[in-house]
Image: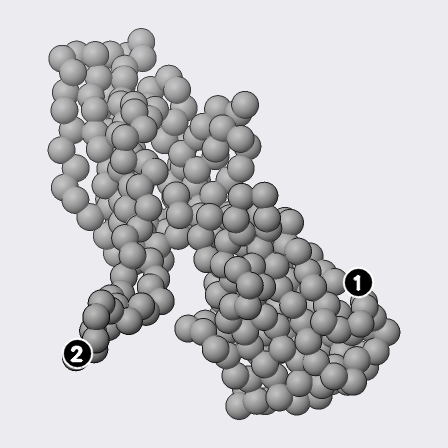
Amino acid sequence: MARERWLVDGYDLTDGLVRDVEYRAGLTGTPAVVGANATVPNRIGELWRPKHHGPGKFTLALWLAPTKGGWQDVEAAWDDLLRVVARPHRLLTFERHTAAGQVRRCEGEVLSALTPTPLGQSGMRVSLEVNVPAGYWVSADTSTQATAPGTPVPQDLALTEFADATAPMEQLAYLLSGPITAPTVTDTTDGTGDSFTYTGQIGAGQTLTVDAATWQLTGGGGFVPDPGRLTNTGPAFLRLAPGRPGKPPSVRLTGTNTGPTTQLTVTGRRAYLT
């Protein structure tokens, strides 16, 4: 097991000598669900509606301690902390190195007043309450998986590289390699989920990238995509659900007029609730 570390914009909050995380309460809360079911007059119960997560929150409870220099070291550490986290004009990048060796990141803001508690001359405690507007954490590294080129459609892809995600993934890019006509990519993690379809033809040697993170279409090999030809069933180009225990998320590529180079490649960052 690795030592858990927390960094803000590259500044290490957990050096273990002068500053560190004191306790874990408040670190692992999940975002609240946003949305409501619909009521229909004269009908029993409610009509279920899909929900999504709101902003995330977590609290870092830190301690600051002196070294050989005494209390002035605590004050210096406090000043350094203020220089790092007291930046209301922009979002901060929080980075968590887990005990399992993973690195997860989020962009957050410290909204509450900072009120440290002195511990005599032996140090101080302070809590950082962080709001995460985007809701989720994401992996620091990107993962890529692809189907075997030329496999007959439907091409099914088990995304084992994304198996440890705990939140829906929107920061993914889907690369479609031709030839293929009217390609459809469907989330099959929980049966048949959301999908997107490009109602056009991608020729041999051409590619289409559907970037769910940036809402952009990019062509390769001379292919010029028409955004008006892309339709999707969900709130994003394709919001991929996290897998269940022992089962990774999965997608399926369908279409017509395929060939030996037809392929689906998925690239992006895993998403986490905490």
Residue under the image location 16 percent in, 29 percent down: 116
Q: Please, what secondary structure does the residue beneath circle 1 have?
A: loop
Give the Cα distance between marks 1 and 2: 53 Å
Amino acid found under the numbered disc labelled 2? Asn
Per the rendering, the mark at residue 148 is: 1
**In the rendered image of this protein, does residue 119 appear above or below residue 261?**
above
| Residue 139 in the figure: left or right of residue 208 | left
Residue under the image location 31 percent in, 12 percent down: 67
Percent across and percent down for residue 270 are 53, 51
The answer to whether residue 224 of the structure is visible from this angle is no
The residue carrying mark 2 is 42
Residue depth check, mark 1 versus mark 2: number of the one nearer the observer: 2
Residue toward you, 226 or 64: 226
**In the rendered image of this protein, does residue 17 appear above or below residue 156?**
above
Image marks 1 and 2: residues in contact by CB distance under 8 Å: no
Q: Quadrant of the C terminus?
A: top left
| Residue 256 in the figure: left or right of residue 18 | right
